[in-house]
Image: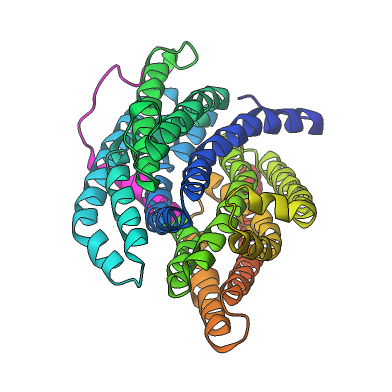
């Protein structure tokens, strides 16, 4: 990365960082997309089972990944402040932390997965698919979390095209393994939805190994020599990582978990409704990669500018990122309005599932717009290392407002399952307003701090 002066230079730098991140996120999301899509073409029960499994796994994955993403603002600010010698130390500490988190997840899964699934009113086939899908995914936990650290390190340096290449390479591998293991082609076992879990876990190992080799030997990363010394676990570094990462992780967890909670509440409806809801949610999650990618780019760019003590440039990047996300959300809204039925047909051939999916996609339009404001705003706040208020605001918006509103509308009005989606829209809209207010407050404080320092 480099300092920029003109608006055109900032646009160029933003796009240089953003586009590879976007492609990477779309490719990662595509793994879940193809898991869901290909399972849906196996049977509606397999689609519903994978939907339940994904809904339990995604909040855990994204929340803990959020903790590990603390390495991004740490590295970007170190680079901006010309303290590159500290980078390898923090990356190794984050890798140790990723291993510890993996162990916690695996141990918790042994004791919690079965009781949770048994407490849900699922058809036997749906229950079994969900259970064994999660068992298969467990084998990919360690490499996934390690890859998150390595990817965050490379992205923080502005080298986002490397993680893009790694992820793009892994996508066809994942699709091929799905093809072999879901449908039992070429003599492989016919595992249905469970096969998608096996395929994804295997793919995680591949991307971790490739990322490790790239970070160790790639010429763009050689000066950091992150594996030159394997540091022991340091409590002070873990404390800093956790101090920044836990609020990020909880903020992401609260945002993703509310969608999973809605899916789990949908288990009270029939299999077609569960399948349609998950199909619509899966496509909406794919579109969410747009604001999420901008969020990650802003963390890098704002962190770099704040590390270099340039508040005006950090503010400009925030405005560029958020405005870009809003424009893109309006474009995706048009896509859903015009081609909603075609999107629904991507997930199922069942007429009832297609019709229900199309209805759910209409509601998805509205929370896409709120996401376009809230998500990039969180990215900018992370660049400032202002993470605790965002965590509290997301909890308030999604869990104190959004989910209760959705539950009441679903239970006590004629909207039924659509009531949950209205609740999601309400919570996301409130969150967008509150987070934007917080960002403006932080920017004013940061600017005032610099002006005060210059006056002294």
Of residues 21 and 354, the one drawn nearer to the viewer in this rendering: 354
Q: Is residue 219 visible?
A: yes
Query: Which quadrant: the N terminus?
Result: top right
Residue 108 appears in which quarter of the rendering? bottom left
Q: Is residue 153 visible?
A: no
What residue is rendered at 22% in x and 45% in y?
103
Residue 212 appears in which quarter of the rendering? top left
Does 246 sit above or below residue 214? Answer: below
Does 196 sit above or below residue 260? Answer: above
Residue 452 location in percent, x, y? 63, 49
State left or right for residue 69 relative to residue 294.
left
Q: Is residue 385 magenta?
A: no
Of residues 137 and 279, the one drawn nearer to the viewer in this rendering: 279
- The magenta stretch is 224-248
Judged by its main secondary structure, the magenta piece is: helix
State left or right for residue 329 relative to residue 194.
right
Query: Which quadrant: the C terminus?
Result: top right
Of residues 83 and 263, the one drawn nearer to the viewer in this rendering: 263
Residue 237 location in percent, x, y? 30, 40
What residue is rendered at 32% in x and 64% in y?
124
Residue 6 location in percent, x, y? 80, 30
What residue is rendered at 62% in x and 65% in y?
356
Q: Is residue 234 magenta?
A: yes
């Amino acid at each position: 990365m480099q300092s920029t002066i003109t608006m055109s230079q900032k646009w160029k730098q933003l796009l240089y960082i953003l586009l590879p991140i976007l492609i990477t996120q779309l490719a990662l999301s595509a793994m879940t997309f193809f898991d869901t899509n290909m399972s849906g073409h196996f049977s509606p029960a397999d689609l519903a089972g994978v939907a339940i499994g994904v809904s339990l796994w995604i909040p855990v994955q994204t929340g803990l990944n959020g903790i590990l993403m603390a390495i991004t603002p740490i590295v970007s600010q170190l680079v901006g402040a010309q303290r590159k010698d500290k980078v390898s130390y923090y990356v190794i500490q984050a890798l140790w932390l990723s291993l510890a988190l993996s162990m916690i997840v695996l141990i918790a899964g042994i004791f919690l997965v079965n009781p949770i699934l048994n407490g849900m009113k699922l058809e036997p086939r749906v229950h079994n698919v969900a259970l064994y899908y999660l068992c298969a995914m467990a084998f990919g936990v360690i490499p996934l979390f390690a890859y998150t650290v390595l990817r965050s390190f490379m992205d923080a340096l502005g080298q986002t095209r490397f993680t893009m290449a790694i992820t793009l390479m892994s996508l066809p591998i994942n699709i091929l393994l799905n093809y072999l293991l879901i449908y039992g082609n070429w003599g492989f076992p016919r595992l249905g939805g469970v096969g998608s879990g096996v395929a994804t876990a295997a793919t995680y190992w591949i991307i971790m190994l490739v990322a490790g080799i790239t970070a160790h030997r790639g010429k763009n990363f050689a000066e950091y020599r992150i594996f030159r010394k394997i540091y022991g676990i340091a409590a002070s570094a873990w404390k800093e990582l956790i101090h920044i990462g836990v609020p990020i992780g909880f903020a992401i967890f609260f945002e993703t978990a509310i969608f999973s909670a809605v899916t789990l509440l949908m288990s009270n409806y029939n299999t077609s409704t569960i399948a349609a809801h998950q199909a619509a949610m899966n496509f909406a999650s794919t579109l969410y990669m747009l604001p999420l990618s901008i969020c990650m780019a802003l963390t890098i760019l704002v962190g770099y500018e704040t590390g270099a003590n340039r508040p005006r440039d950090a503010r400009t990047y925030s405005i560029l990122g958020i405005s870009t996300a809003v424009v893109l959300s309006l474009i995706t809204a048009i896509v859903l309005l015009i081609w909603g039925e075609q999107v629904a047909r991507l997930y199922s051939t069942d007429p009832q599932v297609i019709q229900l999916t199309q209805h759910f996609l209409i509601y998805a339009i509205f929370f896409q717009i709120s996401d376009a404001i809230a998500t990039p705003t969180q990215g900018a706040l992370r660049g400032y290392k202002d993470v605790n208020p965002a965590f509290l605001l997301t909890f308030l918006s999604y869990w104190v407002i959004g989910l209760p509103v959705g539950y009441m509308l679903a239970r006590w009005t004629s909207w039924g399952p659509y009531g949950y989606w209205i609740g999601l829209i309400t919570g996301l809209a409130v969150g967008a307003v509150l987070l934007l207010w917080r960002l403006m407050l932080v920017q004013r404080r940061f600017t005032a701090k610099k002006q005060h320092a210059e006056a002294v």
